[in-house]
Structure formats: C-alpha cells, structure tokens
C-alpha cells in the first residue's frame, strides 16, 4: 500500500517533469531551426551579392580626355571663361604651358594630343590620339595648309608647348567647310565612329558643333 501510494504521488510529478522537458526540447529545436534558417538566409543573401548580383562596373573613361579637361585650371576658383573669337570659335585655357618657345602660328608644324567629340552625340568622343590599347598616337600637321578642321586651327593660334585648350568649333568653322584636299583632320579611326559623325554632318537639322581638347607637345 505504501509503495502504491508512493508511485501514485510520483506519477503527477514525473508527468510534470516530462512535460517541462518536452517544452524545453521543443524550444531548443525551434531555436536551432530558427538559427539554421537565419544562417541559410544570410548565406543566400551573401551568395546573391557575390554570384547573382554582380557589382556595378565603373563607367569606362577616356583618361586622356579627363586629364586634358581637368588638369591645372588657370584660376584659383577652378574655372576660366570661354573667349569667343571673330569666327565664332570659342576657346578656354585649361592649362598654361611653361611659356617658353615659339607660339603656334600659320606655317608652324605641330604635334598634339587631341580628343574630339560632337556635342550632339551625348559627349561621346569620335576621335582620340590615345588608341584603344592605350598607345599614344599624336597628330601632326602644318598649320595653315588646309589639313585640319579650320576652326580647330583658329583656336590653336597662340598656343605654346605644354598648353592645354578646350576649343568649341561651330558647324560653319568645322567639317562642313568646303575644300578640295583630303578629309580634314582629325578623322574617326573606325566605321562606327565615322558613321556616328556623318549622321550629324550630313543632317542639316542636327547641330554639328565639335569640341576639341588639345595639348601641344611640339612646335617647330
């Protein structure tokens, strides 16, 4: 009787302990499951970043163009105004050279680094003296012999070695000027750029203004 009474009293206690253990085990399982889900989610997110969502590439830039356009501005405030010449060509000095040697004038042979872009092509260069593989390929010609765009030559008059100018040439002083010689320098290097430029030059309803960034390497 005493044993039966003992087990009778022990039964509810065991049941209570068993129930409490099940609750704890269940909570532990849920906690582990939650952690596993959280970990899987973290790993999935990381995988998506590394594999599924590639990093945004930096925009391709023409280093020569940037260097010519931003290098050592003349004034302390970082800007100088454009000067408009008689024919409508606008020039802006981006860097003053050493100031020694001869200045460009008609009859001088020049070697220059140059970028050219049509303002109506969203600022995309159609010519650069820097080749696609990074090799420099400067332009050279004699000023006044009709080899280069007339407005470009006009905007270069007075430049000295090392000077950098930004030159804006209106259509009337650009490729549209009639001449009997070879096509004006600079000319696009490939068919894609040539077709893009021609789409402007051959359409009278489009603005054919050209922007040149020029650095003088040599004058003789």
Image: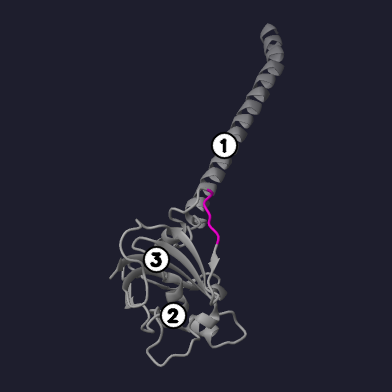
Q: Which mark is residue 149?
A: 2
Q: Who comes first in sequence, dot 2 or dot 1?
A: 1
* Count of numbered circles on the image: 3
Q: Is residue 64 visible?
A: yes
Tell me, yes or no, whether the highlighted magenta stretch contains residue 79: yes
Magenta highlight: main SS: loop
**Residue that appears at 68% across and 10% down:** 6
Position of 176 relative to 80 (above/below): below
The magenta span reads 77-81
Label 1 sits on residue: 35
Specify whether 211 is left or right of 144: right
Q: Position of residue 141 (x, y in %)?
A: 32, 77
Q: Quadrant of residue 187?
A: bottom left
In the rendered view, does 10 fall on the left or right side of 108?
Answer: right
Is mark 2 in CB contact (under 8 Å) with mark 1?
no
Residue with the most extreme bottom position = 180
Q: Which mark is residue 159?
A: 3
Give the spatial CA distance, label 3 vs label 2. 16 Å
């Amino acid at each position: 009787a005493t044993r039966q009474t003992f087990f009778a009293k022990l039964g509810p206690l065991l049941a209570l302990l068993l129930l409490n253990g099940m609750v704890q085990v269940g909570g532990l399982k849920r906690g582990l499951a939650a952690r596993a889900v959280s970990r899987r989610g973290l790993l999935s997110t990381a995988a998506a970043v590394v594999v599924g969502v590639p990093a945004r590439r930096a925009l391709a830039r023409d280093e020569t163009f940037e260097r010519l356009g931003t290098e050592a501005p003349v004034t302390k405030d970082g800007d100088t105004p454009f000067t408009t010449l008689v024919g409508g060509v606008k020039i802006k000095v981006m860097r003053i050279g050493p100031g020694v040697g001869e200045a460009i004038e008609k009859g001088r042979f020049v070697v220059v680094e140059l970028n050219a872009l049509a303002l109506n092509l969203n600022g995309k260069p159609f010519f650069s003296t820097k080749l696609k593989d990074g090799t420099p390929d400067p332009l050279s010609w004699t000023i006044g012999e009709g080899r280069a765009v007339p407005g470009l030559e006009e905007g270069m008059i007075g430049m000295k070695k090392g000077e950098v100018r930004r030159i804006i040439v209106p259509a009337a002083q650009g490729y549209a000027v009639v001449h009997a010689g070879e096509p004006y320098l600079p000319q696009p290097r490939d068919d894609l750029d040539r077709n893009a430029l021609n789409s402007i030059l051959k359409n009278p309803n489009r603005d054919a203004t050209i922007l040149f960034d020029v650095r003088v390497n040599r004058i003789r």
